[in-house]
Image (cartoon, rainbow, N blue to C red):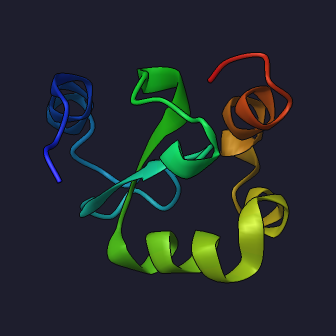
Amino acid sequence: MRVSKKIIEYRKKHQWCEACYRIRHHIHHIKSRGAGGTDDHSNLIALCARCHNRIHTIGHVRFIQEYPHLGEKIYAVKKGVVT
């Protein structure tokens, strides 16, 4: 799969995990592309391997409980304010 320019730009701007501040390895789509999510920066979060696995394992709601500073961004996408 080809990586979009928007993801490349986001990756350059975010060198650290936005949750725990370790070095990031993944760009995570808050709303998946399969569910209609886009590559817009508002729908992306840079995560380390641990946090990326964690968000998929425990889900967004519990992830926000662990990292409340990401709540506003995740809830905005999940509630359809941004894609």
81 sits to left or right of 15: right
Position of 51 relative to 81 (above/below)? below
> Quadrant of the image for the N terminus?
bottom left
Q: Quadrant of residue 21?
A: bottom left
How many dots with numbers?
0
Q: Closest to the observer: 38 or 58?
A: 38
Q: Which part of the image, by quadrant, shows the C terminus?
A: top right
> Residue at 82% across / 68% down in the picture?
62
Nearer-the-camera pick, 13 or 83: 83
Q: Is residue 26 left or right of residue 70?
A: left
Q: Position of residue 64 (x, y in %)?
A: 77, 56
- Percent across and percent down for residue 47 are 40, 58
In the picture, measured across the screen, residue 60 lies left or right of residue 3, that is: right
Residue drawn at point x = 77 percent, y = 26 percent: 76
Q: Is residue 18 left or right of residue 71?
A: left
Q: Position of residue 48 (x, y in %)?
A: 35, 67
Q: Nearer the viewer, residue 7 or 73?
A: 7
Q: Which residue is at a point 49% across and 79% down the rendered structure image?
A: 53
Task: Tell me the residue at 76%/49% (across/down).
Answer: 68
